[in-house]
Image: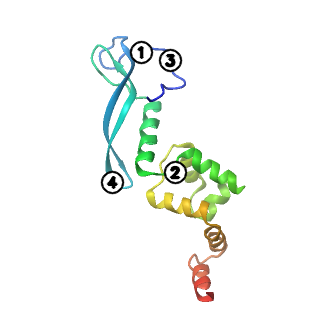
Amino acid sequence: MSEPPKKSKPFPWRCPHCGKKEVEPLATDYETQVKHDGRLYSMLIEKFLIPTCRHCGEKVFSVAEDERICDALRQKLNLLAPDQIRSRIRELGLSQKEVASQLNIAEETLSRWVTGAMIQSKAMDTLLRLYFDIPQVRSSLAVMQQETDFGVPMVRQIENQ
């Protein structure tokens, strides 16, 4: 079962729809559709704990519920979770700034993936996995970063093989 939000005011809450103080956590199977990376994904999240008004049935979504939906989407798409990205960067002994630079992305973008504020595309997830798992990818990207013409180092490597 999903965990309740860590920091929230105590229940019951006042319902934004009917105004009654009847909102309590309710575990329910929640169906939703989420658009990500240009595609629409249908998801069923079983036993999803959602604050729900006992009087009118209104579901009250907060940041905590949104985060759990994002976590479920990451799981469905088999994307790296924020803590996995953070720990892999730490394992390499690099800063987020260094990794972002080598991946040719904004440091803020990587920061959003690490904090969970944004979900990386499937293509960027694949690049992250290659970067984390294959030292030659890291080496090639480091060389490419140093060049002004982004494609030159790869051409040189291919020609030298």
Instruction: Tell me the SS state at disc 4.
Output: strand
Instruction: Tell me the SS state at disc 1.
Output: loop
> Mark 2 or mark 3, which is nearer to you?
2
Colour mapping used in the image: rainbow
Is residue 111 visible in the rendered image? The answer is no
Which residue in the protein does label 2 denote? 80
Front residue of 7/48: it is 48
Mark 3 packing: few (<14 Cα in 10 Å), some, or many (20+)? few
For this view, does 95 lie left or right of residue 41?
A: right
- Three-letter residue code for mark 2: Leu
User: Are the residues flagged by discs 2 and 1 in contact, CB closer than 8 Å?
Assistant: no
Which residue in the protein does label 3 denote? 9
- Looking at the rendered structure, which numbered label has been put on residue 13? 1
> Mark 2 or mark 4, which is nearer to you?
2
User: Are the residues flagged by discs 3 and 1 in contact, CB closer than 8 Å?
Assistant: yes
For this view, does 91 lie left or right of residue 25?
A: right
- Three-letter residue code for mark 3: Lys
Q: Outermost residue, top direction?
A: 21
Label 2 or label 1, whichever comes before in sequence order? 1
Whole-percent x, y for residue 12 in the image: 42, 13
